[in-house]
Amino acid sequence: MTDRLESREKVTGAARYAYEYPLENAAHAAAVQSTVAKGEITAVDADAALRIPGVLAVLSCENAPHLHEVPDGELALFQSRTVAYRGQFVAAVVAETLDIAREAARHVRVHYVSEPFDVRLAVDDPRLYKPDKVNPAFPTDTEQGDPEGAFAGSAVRVDATYTTPAEHNNPMEPHATAARWNADGTLTLYDSTQGASPTQETIARVFGLDRTHVRVVAPHVGGGFGSKGTPRPSVVLAAMAAGAVGRPVKFAVPRQQMFATTGYRTPTIQRFRLGADADGTLNSIVHEVFEQSSTVTEFAEQTAVATRVMYRAADRRTSHRLARLDVPTPSWMRAPGETPGMFALESAMDELAYAAGVDPVELRIRNDTDREPESGLPFSSRNLVACLREGADRFGWEHRDPAPGARREGDKLVGTGVAASTYPAYMRPNKASARADADGTFTVRIAAADIGTGARTALALIAAEALKADADRVTVEIGDSALPQATVAGGSAGTASWGTAVVRACEALRGKMNGSVPPEGLEASADTADEIRARDEYARHAFGAQFAEVEVDADTGEVRVRRMLGVFAAGRIINPKAARSQFVGGMTMGIGMALMEESVMDPRYGDYVNRDLAQYHVPACADVRDIDAVWVEESDPHLNPMGSKGIGEIGIVGAAAAVANAVHHATGVRVRDLPITPARLL
Ligand code: MOS
């Protein structure tokens, strides 16, 4: 149980976030968003804005510098007159103060020729196509055996369509960048990012610089949930603006502008067909996904990929179809793919449990597998059944009357539900260094990111163990691209990937130390690329089981989650205190997904209407009453030197299905379209 190393800095306000860096002579930027969903910019009239005292520049397609390369279409800021979605950045004002910049932005007149647009995702959309791969590089479709035939011949069948809405990542700290061009032509970015090294790499390409001529500094980041996993147009805006005015420029995306410019989870339409024997043993699994991307960039979420991992069945098929609509580009949001996909699969499994008359926990145990169903690979470890049993025991599942709508307490209908969780245990190559000083202290360096997860603390614990030193003698330096190159805090792969490089650097250092340290100190470094490439082939995934109890007001249809328990099998847990917080945080986000979160598309304007946390609802403390996460012991020698799997995302996976299944148990109403609002229940 280790407190976060930076906790005092954070609660006293000493921890510095991107916008807070005191840059000398800094100017401030504010962005102008398009008011049409599709069209061409005919003119940008900046005169009125430029007349306001304190305004330094107005940037737009009419005067923006040419960007060297745009690895992601969203980064092609002000590079053309074409508007691809409503809310796209079309101009920026740079001014002496933030207030002047924001006021002047209101006076920039952008003239458009607007065109008809299409923002509605539908299974009959003629724009639907089969992308080459789904995020990040999975096959788009898979098929084994004769799934349709096996389904038709099955004694028990479920054929149901589920939908999940667009959902927007809303980290507490908005996306913010403070950019400074230095006298030697290099660029320094204080940036709210999940990856200093990847942002360095991308922004260097955008501005045609050598990678080493960009430095990205991000020691503290106030959340991201994937939305800061790749640089957004806001980073380009700050750097471009700083170049234009010859001064440092700060730009923070206001919450109101985040809904169009910093990514979101694609809405999905998912048809499931499950065919089983009378005892619930699966024969056939068919998962068909329909989702959206923008016209600027293809982002194809891997929604059906978890279905390839979960349950045994000889005949099976998964597919993804994508429509490029006139909308902002979706991106990563906590467990992209697994989260919406497992809502559908685990809802369908609950429907199958009722159709077959088998207990939902038992149904999942009955369809467990010791080989990854589609690859045939052995699992490095798979303890789904242990999680289900442990959870059922702790939650008091055995006393459950399976009949829907059977439990009433006053005007509340009460029910319980279960769902499985899974998330891959990814590993990526990283570099790290470790240094010993003569005073007995150690310094470990790696450009890792702590986005609020406790990564810095986990790495300190990992380093101390590898050095056989007390943790208070180890300093970990992260969050700066000047440190050894590191991968993104994403895919729940941070601790496993960075930690392996840290262990290897510490081992190399111990080899050099040989018992003593010279006055000038000793240093060693590591690169894990070869080690990761040489690993044996296993299917590596974490698993879990989520249990929820809900009460539904019989008159109003309001749903409350009374209690929720998650049991996870995720290898060795490095820091129990921070791990519990990750699991519970994910589960809380799952409650939000089940009951509240919904970005609403206005088809008249072609825009998500949500603009703030009053309109985009996430759970507050009163919505989360009794929530707990525990884990089963799991020793897996095929992972990494720590024996750990990622834990940042699995907590949300399956959580919404557990709640939805509990709502069905309480009421007898199966809601297949999230979120479960009173209107959908009554
Ligand atoms: Mo996470 S959505 O992979 O940052």
Image (spheres, grey):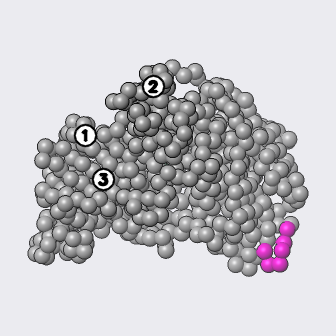
Could you tell me if the residues under marks 1 and 2 are in contact, i.e. CB atoms within 8 Å?
no
Per the image, the residue denoted by label 1 is: 205
Calculate the distance from the C-alpha at mark 2 to the C-alpha at mark 3: 38 Å
* Rendered image: mark on residue 516: 2
**First to last magenta residue range:** 407-412
> Residue, x 74% and y 75% (percent of image)?
553
The percent coordinates of residue 227 (x first, y second) are 43, 53
Q: Element under label 3? A: strand
Amino acid type, mark 2: Ser
Asked if residue 409 is among those painted magenta in the image, a careful observer would answer yes
Q: Could you tell me which residue is drawn at 73 percent across and 66 percent down?
A: 562
Residue at the spot 88% in from the left edge and 53% down from the top edge? 398
Mark 3, other Cα within 10 Å: few <14 / some 14–19 / many ≥20: many
Q: Position of residue 242 (x, y in %)?
A: 18, 56
Q: In which quadrant of the rendered view does residue 555 lie? A: bottom right
| Location of mark 3 (residue) | 190
**Residue at (64%, 38%) from the top-left corner?**
572
| Earlier-in-chain disc, 2 versus 3 | 3
Asked if 550 appears above or below 374 in the picture, the reply is: below
14 in relation to 273, above or below: below
In this rendering, the answer to whether 593 lies above or below 46 is above
Say whether residue 393 is visible: yes
State which quarter of the image contains the C terminus.
bottom right
Q: Is residue 80 magenta?
A: no
- At label 1, the amino acid type is Arg
Which is closer to the viewer, label 3 or label 1?
3
Picture layout, residue 28 above or below residue 535: below
Specify whether 643 is left or right of 348: left
